[in-house]
Image (cartoon, rainbow, N blue to C red):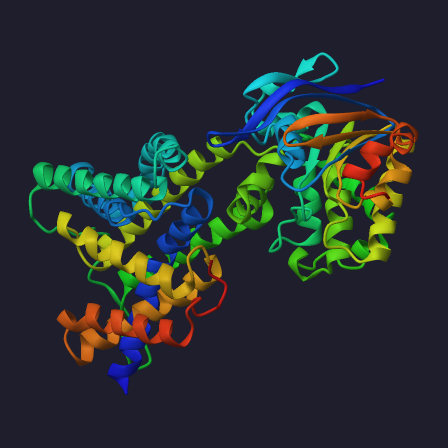
Amino acid sequence: MDLFLQTLLNGLLIGGVIATFTIAFQLTFGVLHVIDFAVGGWVVLGGYLGYYVTALLGLDGFVAIPLAFVLFGALGYLIGPVLYNVRNSRTARPELMALALTFGLFTLLRGGMLTAWGFNTRNVTSMLSGESLAVGPVIVPLIRVAAAVFAVAIAGGLFLFLYRTRYGLAIRATAENRHNAALMGVNIRRLSANVYGLYAGITAMAGVLMGAIYSVNPEVGLRYTLFAFFVAVLAGLGSVGGAVVAALMLGVIEAFVSTYVGSSYSLLAIFATLFVVLLASPKGILRRGL
Amino acid sequence: MSRLAAENVVTGYGKQEIVHGVSLSAEAGQITCIFGPNGCGKSTLLKAIAGALPVWGGSARLDDTVLSNLPVHEVVRQGLVLMPQGGGVFPRLTVMENLRMGGYAIADKRLVESRIEALIEQYPSLARRRRTAAGALSGGEQAMLSLARALVSEPRFILLDEPSAGLSPAMVIETLERITTLTEQGIGILMVEQNIREAMPIADRLYILAAGEKRFEGSPGDVRDDRQIMDIYMGGA
């Protein structure tokens, strides 16, 4: 019973971190109509930044969270217009061209990181590393609790921005119908670049947290891209609310399979779940997808 | 008095030219209607004037401002709003959020809020349902929301793409009445309409398009006198 509770809690904590970047992933799909294959690359970049903040500067790994947002947010902001131009070009099948572009970006990030940092696995360390918290019979590593708290804060901040500011309203309107949003005076091109920057920044922040819970190396990016795809399909492409539910489910499934079956089966279990859910509800769990 | 004018506008979708050089003008405080058979390019012309489609040749101007050089999101800042077919409300946003989007181009947030409060009093069905998602409103309520939203920016001209489409006969009458009262406030209306029977009596000036070209312009009185035009395009209405 203790192991069950322990696994459930672990799964929810990790699911919370996955939720932060999958929310942003969904938002990006809504606004740019691009499925960003590079999502895992942004996660890994954040993880490395968390590692180097300690390794080079001697600071606590969590200090990298705001840095990741600024640095990778700026990089995303520069890439955003390119992605927008490709997606809205007059070539045949611009949606496939854009997907190919993000796949290329992912390959570039992965290859660049392999060249620069090699295969070595790195951890984000904090003064909380190694400490743990006992909640009754359940023992939780403090660093996971901290990661989940940061994740909730990031997601909460994003929701406040989306639901309490004019620009957030414009983003939600654009995600629904960008032609009509443009008629209301929204500069869609600029907004798309901003959203891609916001998304890249948030995803890299989640990467710092992921690096603190697990570890990073350039090869794990694909795993996070698959996670984002899983959440997007389960939630319904573009659905932000569904992403939270689906990410928590993903975290819990992964934790249970890893604990009771073996971690090599976790992707199998995740995609089997996806298959069953799609059979039962093709529009996603909340039936609000596109 | 403001004047909206299109001069020899050529436009279309992709590589397909649909409107082959049409000129028209609309005055503030008047209702100008564009009639014509399906696929004649009425809506395409309207979108091109509003900047939602690129103008390939000719130009659209509002007084001295050339609209056809502006990106679509700047056009609303010049005092011109397009109401797309079906109203174009954002179904997942609430009534209030839709209205706030109507004022997105205005920098002063408090001004937008006070305009919305003043407007919403004139639309009781919306005032009762501020926090309802627009997609949950009836077709008629969505039409009212769309009209109220267009007014938040206090435009000089409103372009309407078939405001009566999909509405019940009673709602068509209410919508057209509301449009008529807008002209009393000095707003100019340029609208594309299929429902000639209802729209003709409120029109001050009208144009008939066919196959992307202008076939007629004049007052409703002129068109009634023209038997040939009446028979071909107006179904004898």
Nearest the viewer among A192 and B163 is B163
Against B123, is B208 above or below? above
Residue at the bottom extreme? A1
- The answer to whether residue A143 is left or right of residue B213 is left
Where is the N terminus of chain A found, in terms of image quarters? Answer: bottom left
Nearest the viewer among A219 and A52 is A219
Residue occupying the point 81% across, 33% down: B229
Against A129, is B68 above or below? above
Residue occupying the point 7% across, 47% down: A119
Against A146, is A73 above or below? above
- The answer to whether residue A16 is left or right of residue B36 is left
- Give the quarter of the image for residue B75: top right
In the image, residue B91 lies at what x, y percent?
62, 54
In the image, residue A188 lies at what x, y percent?
51, 34
Nearest the viewer among A199 and A186 is A186
In the image, residue B111 lies at what x, y percent?
76, 34
Residue occupying the point 87% across, 30% down: B226
In the image, residue A250 lies at what x, y percent?
31, 68
Can residue A150 be seen from the camera position used here? no
